[in-house]
Image (cartoon, rainbow, N blue to C red):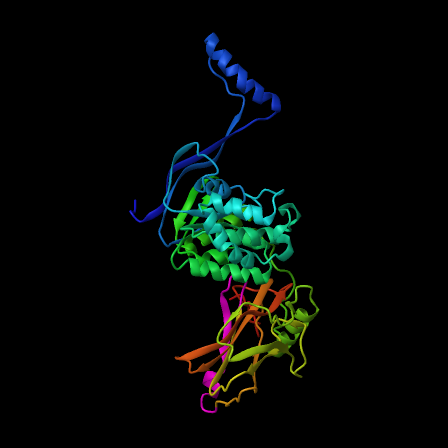
């Protein structure tokens, strides 16, 4: 065992007694004792269910560790034992450091208490003193950003508001170990981006235990992963190997491993279609199909989280069509223009404007800036002047979900510059449906062929 381990689990087991009927509980309480007194062999009136069995692993300091598995595999039971809210039947668990957990939404909250009262209660449970809580209360309120509802009973909260309050608390208790269990799936795009930025900063010095059905999140966040199957460790390896094993098990469970007999094709083979006809057919299919990559475009969010000197500020961000008209809906694969408008409050000698498109986890899918294309002819902007940057590109096909454009204006060079205004989540786009997409983005195929040799 590593001496740098912050979590060490050895032969962990958790068993439950499952009763077929309520009367069996009474039988189990009375009859075994009576049988022992009378000298008869003891008999049980329950079925033993092993939620966890012989689970062993360790997590070292600074590691981001993923746990995956199907529903009922034992993930939640394992997390509750690690957090100390559930006792194991057998085995040992060693945790070295302060643990903050975001498990089931609302867990740990008293629904009759207000958000403020629950903050004090949860922060005290997590080890903060009254003085420390009061010193951090304003930061917690700002992070949660639930306004009037902070002083209302938690039972009046939506699931998203409960998430905001819970995450705001664990983000301000100086935890050594964070445990996140699927909770981020219910948040809105702006708050999820804020959470992911916090998690990425936390990962630089803390230990993160991340549980999710989203294999893409595990692949991109975790350094190691564990696969649970029916309460046992099925695989403990790199995220790539664990995810491959997990996906393989899902497919095998759904369709089995035996080859599928298919009828031989009947009739004569269709004649080949030209590449141009294929492209036209495919575009018509995408435009008229319910599985078209439909993308909703929201308005520019001037109140989004930002930083910089503000000697120049971003005042508008829009997606435009080929005729420079604002877009409210886009089809994946469509040619678009991203216009970023800025205002200078001081003289800007060498502006650089750029953007990135981020997914809901904060991963950059693509982006660019104006430096290389305009380094020989950089516009000079006087105080009070305006700056406009235009990027034209073909939007890739995107899987369903929320995405955000992060935009920025800086001054200087690619290697050395000053950030005047960097805006997170300046423009949100939401993908409602998609055609066939593999990976983080999809590229429209110009031709697909299948031939028998």
Residue 74 visible somewhere in the drawing: yes
Residue 258 visible somewhere in the drawing: no
From the viewer's side, name the closer residue of 192 and 72.
192
**Residue drawn where x is 45% and y is 60% of the image:** 200
Which portion, as a residue range, is magenta? 358-377
Residue that extends furthest to the front in the rendered view of this protein:
131
Query: Along the horizontal axis of the image, is 50 left or right of 338?
Result: left
Query: Along the horizontal axis of the image, is 304 left or right of 176?
Result: right
Q: Quadrant of residue 82?
A: top left
Image quarter in which the N terminus is found: top left
How many badges with numbers are in the image?
A: 0
Residue 108 image offset from top left, x and y in percent: 54, 43
**Residue drawn where x is 65% and y is 76% of the image:** 280
**Residue drawn where x is 48% and y is 54% of the image:** 135
From the viewer's side, name the closer residue of 339 and 329.
339
Residue 383 image offset from top left, x and y in percent: 53, 87
Q: Name above or below for residue 266 compared with residue 21.
A: below
Residue 244 image offset from top left, x and y in percent: 45, 54
Membership of 322 in magenta stretch: no
From the viewer's side, name the closer residue of 445 and 230.
230
From the viewer's side, name the closer residue of 27 and 398.
27
Residue that extends furthest to the bottom in the rendered view of this protein:
377
């Amino acid at each position: 065992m590593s001496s740098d381990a912050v979590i060490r689990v050895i032969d962990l087991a958790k068993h439950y007694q499952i009763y077929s009927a309520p009367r069996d509980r009474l039988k189990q309480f009375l009859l075994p004792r009576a049988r022992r007194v009378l000298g008869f062999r003891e008999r049980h009136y329950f079925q033993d269910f092993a939620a966890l069995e012989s689970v062993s692993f360790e997590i070292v300091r600074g590691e981001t560790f993923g746990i995956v598995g199907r529903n009922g595999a034992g993930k939640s039971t394992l997390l509750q034992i690690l957090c100390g809210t559930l006792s194991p039947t057998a085995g040992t668990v060693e945790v070295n450091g302060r643990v903050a957990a975001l498990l089931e939404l609302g867990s740990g909250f008293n629904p009759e208490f207000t958000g403020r009262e629950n903050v004090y209660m949860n922060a005290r449970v997590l080890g903060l003193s009254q003085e420390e809580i009061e010193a951090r209360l304003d930061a917690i309120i700002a992070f949660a950003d639930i306004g009037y509802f902070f002083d209302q009973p938690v039972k009046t909260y939506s699931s998203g508001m409960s998430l905001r309050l819970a995450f705001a608390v664990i983000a301000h208790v100086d935890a050594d170990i964070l445990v996140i269990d699927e909770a981020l799936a219910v948040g809105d795009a702006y708050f999820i981006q804020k959470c992911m930025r916090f998690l990425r900063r936390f990962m630089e010095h803390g230990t993160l235990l991340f549980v999710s059905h989203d294999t893409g999140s595990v692949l991109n966040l975790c350094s190691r992963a564990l696969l649970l199957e029916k309460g046992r460790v099925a695989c403990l390896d790199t995220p790539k190997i664990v995810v491959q094993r997990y996906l393989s098990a899902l497919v095998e469970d759904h369709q089995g491993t035996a080859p599928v007999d298919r009828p031989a094709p009947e009739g004569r083979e269709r004649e080949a279609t030209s590449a141009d006809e294929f492209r036209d057919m495919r575009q018509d299919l995408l435009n008229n199909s319910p599985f078209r990559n439909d993308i909703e475009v929201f308005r520019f969010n001037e109140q989004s989280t930002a930083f910089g000197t503000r000697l120049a500020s971003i005042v508008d961000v829009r997606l435009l069509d080929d005729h420079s008209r604002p877009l409210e809906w886009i089809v994946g694969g469509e040619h678009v223009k991203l216009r970023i408008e800025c205002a200078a409050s001081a003289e800007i000698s060498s502006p650089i404007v750029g953007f990135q498109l981020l997914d809901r986890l904060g991963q950059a899918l693509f982006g660019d800036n104006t430096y290389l294309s305009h380094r020989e002819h950089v516009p000079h902007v006087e105080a009070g002047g305006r700056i406009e940057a235009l990027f034209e590109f073909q939007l890739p096909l995107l899987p369903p979900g929320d995405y955000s454009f992060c935009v920025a204006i800086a001054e200087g060079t690619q290697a050395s510059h000053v950030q005047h205004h960097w805006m997170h989540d300046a423009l949100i786009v939401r993908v409602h449906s998609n055609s066939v997409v593999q990976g983080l983005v999809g590229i429209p195929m110009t031709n697909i062929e299948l031939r028998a040799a």
